[in-house]
Image (spheres, grey):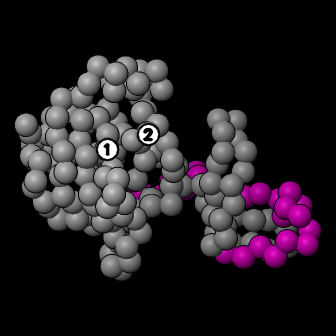
């Protein structure tokens, strides 16, 4: 079976950046699984996987526009320094998790001075080219219960969706 909409897909993968830094990889004992076409993976990964079959491997690059996008200037926010504990030593590139109206929000400190902390709330991989090395471990028709789980969880099957475990948008 070829990878197509509503197929259950399992892949082993390694994800790296232009710097060759490996930033993520699947656990060899538990491949990454998802329902193809259900918005559980980035567009560029989906495009590259479509039509592949079990046992096939590929190496490809996903540009930011089909990954996590380019950084959005409106997601850089100035937060008064007084909203952080006074004794906290805040430095650029520190990462914090804050509570937002829709749940936890990850922010990275872009810059800091005595009055303000400039926080970058973009996805951590915004602006990055993503290099994938992928092997398709399994492709089959999704079972009714797997498709039903997508509906019940707003399009995300928690046991198989990386977006639920990280900060996908």
How many neighbours does mark 2 have within 10 angstroms: few (below 14), some (14-19), or many (20 or more)?
few
Which x, y percent locates residue 20? 33, 79
Q: Residue furthest bottom?
A: 19
Image quadrant containing the N terminus? top left
Would you place residue 6 above or below residue 24 in this image? Answer: above
Q: Which mark is residue 159?
A: 2
Circles 2 and 1, Cβ within 8 Å, touching? The answer is: yes
75 relative to 83 in the view: left or right: left
**Distance of mark 2 from mark 1, alpha carbons?**
8 Å
How many neighbours does mark 1 have within 10 angstroms: few (below 14), some (14-19), or many (20 or more)?
many
Q: Which mark is residue 33?
A: 1
| Magenta highlight on residue 165 | no
Would you place residue 148 above or below residue 56 in this image? Answer: above
Which of the 4 image quadrants contains residue 77?
Answer: bottom right
- The residue nearer to you, when weighing 158 against 111, is 158
Which of the 4 image quadrants contains residue 3?
Answer: top left
The secondary element bearing badge 1 is classed as strand
Q: Residue at x 77, y 73 (%)?
A: 90
The secondary element bearing badge 2 is classed as loop
Asked if residue 61 can be seen in this view, the reply is no
Q: Residue furthest right?
A: 86
Which x, y percent locates residue 59? 17, 65
Asked if residue 151 can be seen in this view, the reply is yes
The magenta stretch spans which residues? 69-92
| Magenta highlight on residue 89 | yes
Q: Residue at x 14, y 61 (%)?
A: 58
């Amino acid at each position: 079976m070829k990878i197509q909409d509503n197929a259950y897909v399992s892949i082993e993968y390694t994800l790296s950046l232009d710097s060759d830094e490996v930033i993520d990889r699947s656990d060899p004992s538990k491949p990454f699984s998802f329902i193809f076409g259900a918005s559980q993976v980035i567009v560029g990964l989906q495009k590259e996987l479509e039509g592949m079959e079990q046992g096939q491997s590929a190496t490809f690059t996903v540009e930011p526009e089909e990954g996590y996008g380019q950084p959005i200037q409106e997601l850089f926010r100035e937060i008064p320094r007084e909203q952080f504990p006074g004794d906290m030593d805040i430095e650029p590139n520190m990462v914090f998790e804050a509570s937002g109206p829709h749940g936890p929000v990850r922010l990275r400190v872009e810059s800091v001075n005595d009055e303000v902390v400039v926080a970058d709330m973009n996805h951590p991989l915004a602006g990055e080219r993503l290099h994938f090395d992928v092997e398709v471990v399994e492709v089959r028709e999704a079972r009714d219960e797997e498709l039903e789980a997508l509906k019940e969880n707003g399009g995300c099957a928690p046991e198989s969706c990386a977006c639920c475990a990280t900060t996908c948008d």
